[in-house]
Image: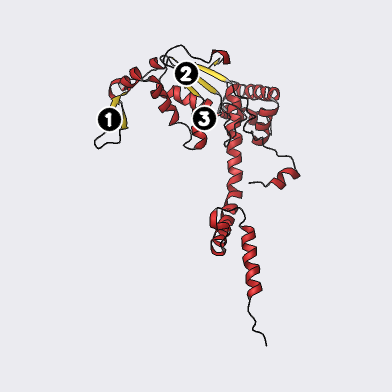
């Protein structure tokens, strides 16, 4: 890494974003019929900020993303009936399984949040990035006043 | 005759190591032995990372150019190919800076690149 001294001696040539000076936008995406993984991949790029030329790895330069119609997210093939989500209750023999389809009916936010979380960096910054994701099962959401921009997937 | 020891030299050596170990975690900045180990190790990392720094920066510039290209509906590879064909010699560092500071200039670069790649038939055909 270049030292402070060297940086002040001549102009730093590569732009470095500063936390707190990042202008964050709001984006909205309709999940209806979009396959879960493709949706999550596109959302993850926006949350990480890799869609903007100011992207800086150690700073969160991403935008906020609102997801609507999460309960209508697409699952291709037989994944709705056959693919299982596991969680461990902490008790012996407490490994529970539920199909993706059932999770989508019962708690659609969990399905999308899980998929996106696993596509983000597994570190402190990744956890901060995830907080900018807001998922809603229906078309209603409380971020109308942010005037979110429609995002293509 | 007074007994001669190497006390002052030892103190000097210890101080030299501890000075280099300032700011290290826990006893690594306080104890002679741990500080010495960490200073050597840090030197190894610094040597290695002066080399990986160059690669890391190049991949960062590429990520940024990719983002700027996607915004304008093209791909990194197509853009770079177009620039090469049209004889634009800007390097990736400058291209990424242009994308951030002069978006309008980058628009024109994309235009130049696209024109060049359409004019030249691809090798496979």
| Mark 3 or mark 2, earlier in chain | 2
Identify the residue at image location x=28%, y=24%.
A82
Q: Mark 3 points at which residue?
A: A129
Please count the marks in the image.
3
- Residue that protrudes farthest toward the left in the picture: A93
Q: In terms of image quadrants, where is residue B85?
A: top right
Which residue carries the number 1 mark? Answer: A96
| Marks 3 and 1 belong to one chain | yes
- Among numbered discs 3 and 1, the one appearing first in the sequence: 1
Picture layout, residue A45 above or below residue B33? above
- Residue position marked by numbered label 2 in the rendering: A67
- Name the residue at the front extreme: B2
Q: Do marks 2 and 1 share a subunit?
A: yes
Q: Disc 2 to disc 1, how far (Cα)? A: 27 Å
Left-right relation of B69 to A141:
right
Secondary structure beneath label 3: helix
């Amino acid at each position: 890494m270049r030292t402070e001294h060297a940086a002040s001696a001549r102009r730093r040539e590569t732009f470095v974003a500063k936390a707190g000076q990042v202008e964050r936008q709001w984006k909205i995406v309709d999940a209806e019929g979009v396959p879960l993984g493709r949706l999550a991949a596109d959302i993850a790029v926006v949350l990480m900020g890799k869609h903007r030329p100011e992207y800086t790895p150690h700073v969160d330069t991403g935008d906020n993303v609102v997801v609507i119609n999460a309960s209508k997210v697409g699952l291709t093939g037989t994944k709705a009936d056959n693919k299982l989500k596991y969680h461990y209750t902490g008790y012996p023999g407490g490994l529970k399984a539920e199909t993706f389809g059932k999770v989508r009916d019962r708690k659609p936010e969990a399905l999308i949040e899980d998929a996106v979380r696993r596509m983000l960096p597994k570190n402190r910054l990744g956890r901060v990035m995830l907080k900018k994701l807001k998922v809603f099962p229906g078309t209603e959401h409380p971020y109308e006043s942010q005037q979110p921009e429609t995002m293509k997937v | 005759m007074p007994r001669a020891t190497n006390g002052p030299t030892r103190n000097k050596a210890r101080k030299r190591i501890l000075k280099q170990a300032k700011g290290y975690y826990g006893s690594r900045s306080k104890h002679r032995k741990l500080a010495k180990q960490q200073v050597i190790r840090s030197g190894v990392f610094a040597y290695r990372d002066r080399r990986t720094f160059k690669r890391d920066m190049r991949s960062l510039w590429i990520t940024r150019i990719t983002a700027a290209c996607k915004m304008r509906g093209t791909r990194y590879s197509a853009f770079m190919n177009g620039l090469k064909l049209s004889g634009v010699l800007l390097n990736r560092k400058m291209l990424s800076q242009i994308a951030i500071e002069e978006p309008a200039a980058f628009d024109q670069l994309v235009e130049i690149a696209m024109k060049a790649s359409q004019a030249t038939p691809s090798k496979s055909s």
